[in-house]
Amino acid sequence: MFKKLLFTALFSAAALADAPVLLPKNKRTFDQSKFIPDMSLIIDTAYVDHSVKASELGHLTLPGFTESLMGSHAHGGTAETPYNATPGFNLNYAELVLSSSVDPFWTLDGVFHFSEDGVSVEEGYVTSTALPMNLRLRVGKMLSNFGRINMQHHHYWDFGDMPLVYETFLGYHGLNEKGAQLQYTTSSSKSDYLMIGAELFQGENEKMFGNEALGTEANPVVEGETAPSLFVSYLKASVDIGKTTVLAGLSYAYGSTRQDHSDDELEPHMVAGNTSLTGAELTVKHFFDSYSFLTWQSEWLSRSTDATEYPVVSDTNTTLTGPTETLAQDQNGFYTQLVYAQDQNWRYGLRWDKLDKNDVAVGGVLNTNQVSDYNRYTVMTEYHASEFSRIRLQYNYIDSMFNDDGDRVDLRTVSLQFNYAIGAHAAHDF
């Protein structure tokens, strides 16, 4: 009996010697469960009806501001169609979001944009979590903190489309660039804060900025600029007054400009120079209770471009058809909106977009025939069955658009938008 007990004890000791040592969870150096990223999937689809034919939509312009508001464009090496641009049913996108802590010093976020046109990395960046003096560093591809709405993803907007001044100046992706951001935030209480930020980007915006050579690699019309070539800075402050929060800010962006309009049917040309963009924002949000609130949000943007225009042969992109001319643009626009949340389920909104200055001078001669007063009026009603689902009915009316024949066209759009999300998704900023 003694031998049997001794053998059993020795066998058990040998087994324990080979077994891994299980430390308490708070003593382990690595726990895989802590590093499983938060994951969410967002789907946005809509039914849309326009007052003009589908074949005309992509040719409607706002002269001086944009060649095409509803036409396809290149983004991230992929041709993309704007949201809700197709009459009838639209699958705008599926957005996959992954985020997690990397270690005690960094977090990692990735936003992947799927559409019927292709797949792109909408955002992919690391953010510091342990810098001293309230500093934060972010590196990768990201939405700039310029202005108010630029940093927000489409599913967070109060309306189904981007404000007109953003869309014409920057495209409906806004300032979405590869680069680095350094941000300093200080606060005097749990609610009040002051934020100062600076960003250095590659400079590849589809509408306003750019640094690539124009023409062909063998025979460029314009040499490229050294990247990074876009600088952004901003100052923002927030204060709580009772149940009301006030957020105000100033933003500034400056960079080189490259625009290739060599496929323009009427006057093919290219543009190279520099552009500055100044923005001012004000948001006032008053809470009636936990779910009911009224928000007034406004932004004003001003663009100034100093460049050279190169007329080219459209089928070669390398041969000048005439002398180069100076190009100067001085343009302003704003939007202002009211959104009322009745309760946890229902919200209503009104928005007025306006482009109110359109000074364009070519060769030192101001184009006095340029339309300088564009307006868009928007009304929306939306129902939230929960915080993960939304159905939005929206009506847009925009005046003074023009077709290829130079005729004025008023565009009216009605959309029924469905937006749904599953999974864990980080909270949005106020």
Image (cartoon, rainbow, N blue to C red):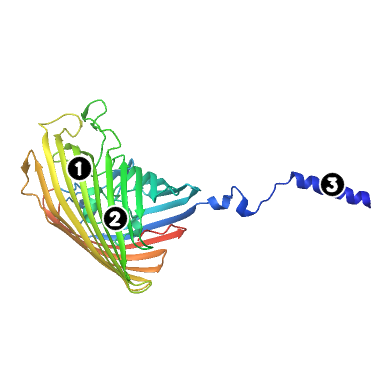
Residue under pointer 2: 236
Does 322 sit above or below residue 156?
A: above
Q: Position of residue 168 (x, y in %)?
A: 21, 50
Compute the Cα span from label 1 to label 3: 80 Å
Q: Residue at x 13, y 47 (%)?
A: 330
- Which of these two is toward me, 9 or 325? 9
Question: Tag 1's secondary structure?
Answer: strand
Amino acid identity at mark 1: Thr
Q: Position of residue 174 (x, y in %)?
A: 28, 49
Compute the Cα span from label 3 to label 2: 70 Å
Is the Cβ of the residue at disc 3 closer than 8 Å to that at disc 2?
A: no
- Which of these two is toward me, 221 or 32? 32
Residue under pointer 1: 275
Q: Can the viewer see residue 205 in this picture? A: no
Q: Can the viewer see residue 281 in this picture? A: yes
Count of picture labels: 3
Dot 2 crowding, Cα within 10 Å, few <14, some 14–19, many 20+ = many
Does 200 sit above or below residue 295?
A: above
Residue under pointer 3: 10
Q: Which mark is residue 356?
A: none
Is the Cβ of the residue at disc 1 closer than 8 Å to that at disc 3?
A: no
